[in-house]
Image: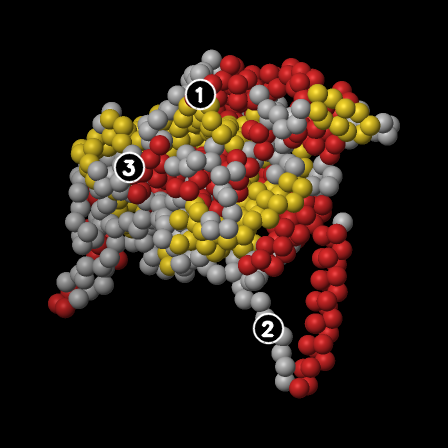
Amino acid sequence: MAGGVTKRTQGKKSQARGTKATQKKSTGVQTRRMPSQAENVVLAMDIGTRSIIGMVGRVEEGRVKIIAIEREEHAERSMIDGQIENIDKVSALAEKVKKRLEDKVRFKLNRVCVAAAGRALRTKRAEYEMELPGTQLIDDEIISRLEAGAIGRAEEAFDAEREAGKDTRRFYLVGYTVCQYFLDQYPISSLKDHRGHHIKADLIATFLPSEVVESLYTTMNKIGLEVASITLEPIAAINAAIPENLRLLNLALVDIGAGTSDIAACTGGSVTGYTMATVAGDEVTETLMREYLVDFPTAEGIKARIGQEEEISYTDILGFERKLSAQQVAGCIQKTSDTLCAEIADKIVEINGGAPSALFLAGGGSKLAGLRDSLASALQMDASRVAIAGNYFQANAYSEEYDLNNPEYATPLGIAISSGLNLINDSFRVILNGRPAKLFRSGSFTALNLLMMNGYSFRDVLGRSGANLTVTVNGQRKVFYGTPARPASLLINKQEGQLSAVIHAGDNIDFEPAVSGAAAKACLQDVEGARESRDITLNGVRVPLHTPLKNGDVIRMEPPGGQEPAGEPRQEEGTKEENEPAVTAGREEEDQAGRTEEDKETQKAAGGQESPEAVIPSQAVAGEPAPRPVEPREIPQDEPVVTSSKEASAQEPAGKEGAPVRTQSREIRFRLNGMPLDLPRKEDGSPYYLMDLIQYSGIDLDHPRGTVLLLVNGMPGMFQQALREGDRVDIKEELS
């Protein structure tokens, strides 16, 4: 109470000083404005179930110097099992911690680093491997594709598990940790700039419900703090307690808080797993409440005094003063403690495959008397291999004012270390479409990682053309094409960016998702010649011309003048006589007799001979002539495509002495998956991009069978890579 009175008095004095300063404005005296948080200063907040711990550190020579620490307990249970229940109450307590820290450091805090946790944290481990053509240099794009494949498998496994459990909550992929890379079957810490034929990644993907993430952001925003970075509590704790040079050993860390127990394991130099148990110190406290009829704070006090006092006195809710021996209290909680240790041990074995070589305990719950021996027994370990964490905190952090070797500091110190050691002359602020992006950090990340962390999907990156409408007219296949997808746009600091580009502190990202095209729609009257025909039927029935068409419809029509029905080239939706007929490759069912001599001559002129076995592209672009495949042959980029000598004479302007002038072809030619592909040149003269050709590859992006592999002229390609005429493009699926 005295401390509270003192603060209120100080507050009144401050107000009085403020009033006097205001009165002195006319005399030229001004109040000193509090400076802002420097870029190398980190504010870490551990929003725990029982308390909020705030730390302010300054990055100096590769370590974080802690200059201020504040801790405040929740007056009410406004958090349950690590998740925020009452945002107003949690934000009020966090603001109190923030103001006390500002009083100590004498500057305004405006950025905060936090850690996400909660009872619903879920992880999935997955592997993915790739065969590279030849022994090629492994760059960031290849590594990005490798990791994306592993993430895709983790997401599939997680989604299947959720569907089986009928879990309808929305989860975010909040980040992932690569456990191990492999190069030609050998483990390696980094693949970049190596050469090899076979690569593999083994990683852990982490998922959290959206409300966990949003509640953290909302709480911090309410007190004027911008979330500069978010990590995961298990990762934060292990970063503080077990430095990288010890991770070659098989070690595990358990951070036992009030509501949850964060667990992480490492071996071979990498973090190999992390998870969370929803049993922790509160289970012990609740046992004491029920047994001795006391409120929550009193039960917490009793628990804290076990092992420190031989006799414990307390007052129950009826007002009676009681006394118990420490041995009696220990016996009361023994069953609960054994249950807690058994569940934690099961989680450790689950992610580690067995008992670790050594176990570190952190968090306030680790101070519980007898817990260390109980955990050692549950894991069948020697008790000397279980220790309280804190001895290695000084590897990455230090303080001249505070003793950091306190197991309760594992998470807040880990948050400061995880964020601070990556703060190189900048904050972790990254802007996505004008707003601070959600960042779950466990290392560097790419533009693709950032988009996935912020709720975008691969569909937003790739898009898809609208579904085609296919009918049969007089025995010939006709296709009305859906509208094309509008490609995604990615700018990094106002420059065109790549999905594999590593995102740095302070980057400004502008992303416009791809927009899928609309499905094709057509009526009977849209079929060429329908209006002029003497008789027309749809699936054997005479119907009005405005009748909508469906996939698979069969149309039979009689041309005017008693002519015999003949096969006609396929057409696009909305294209009439102004566009040349859209012909796709290798129509095996095409009636050869229905083609005119000029058609045959045209094909021979373009490809040398007819090619009835060419592959049919699955989709084309609406509103433009469809790609016109020809018989495979290489054509120099400067050679115009001429369909026939007559057409050439008619289309090409005459030069001197009547000689035809060579003009640029209306089409641009690529080779897609080994087959020629002609596309109309874009009206604005812009190039085609690799993502533009995905719609012609036949891959169903809604139901992919594996990871999409992209090659341009035999080299790994990127979605936004510009193509040149004559490029050889491979877009295939690597089957799972």
The picture places residue 440, in percent across and down from the top left corner, at: 49, 42
The picture places residue 593, in percent across and down from the top left corner, at: 30, 31
Residue 384 is tagged as: 1
User: Which residue is labeled 2 in the image?
Assistant: 32
User: Which residue is labeled 3 in the image?
Assistant: 190
Considering only order in the chain, which callout, 1 or 2, is on the residue closer to the N terminus? 2
Numbered disc 2: secondary structure:
loop
Q: Residue furthest right?
A: 318
Task: Choose mark 2 or mark 1, whichever is in front.
Answer: 1
Residue 494 is tagged as: none
Amino acid identity at mark 2: Arg
Considering only order in the chain, which callout, 1 or 3, is on the residue closer to the N terminus? 3
The picture places residue 119, in percent across and down from the top left corner, at: 60, 30
**Any part of residue 211 in sight:** no
User: In the displayed structure, does residue 166 sit left or right of residue 404?
Assistant: right
- Residue in the foreground of this view, choosing between 406 and 621: 406
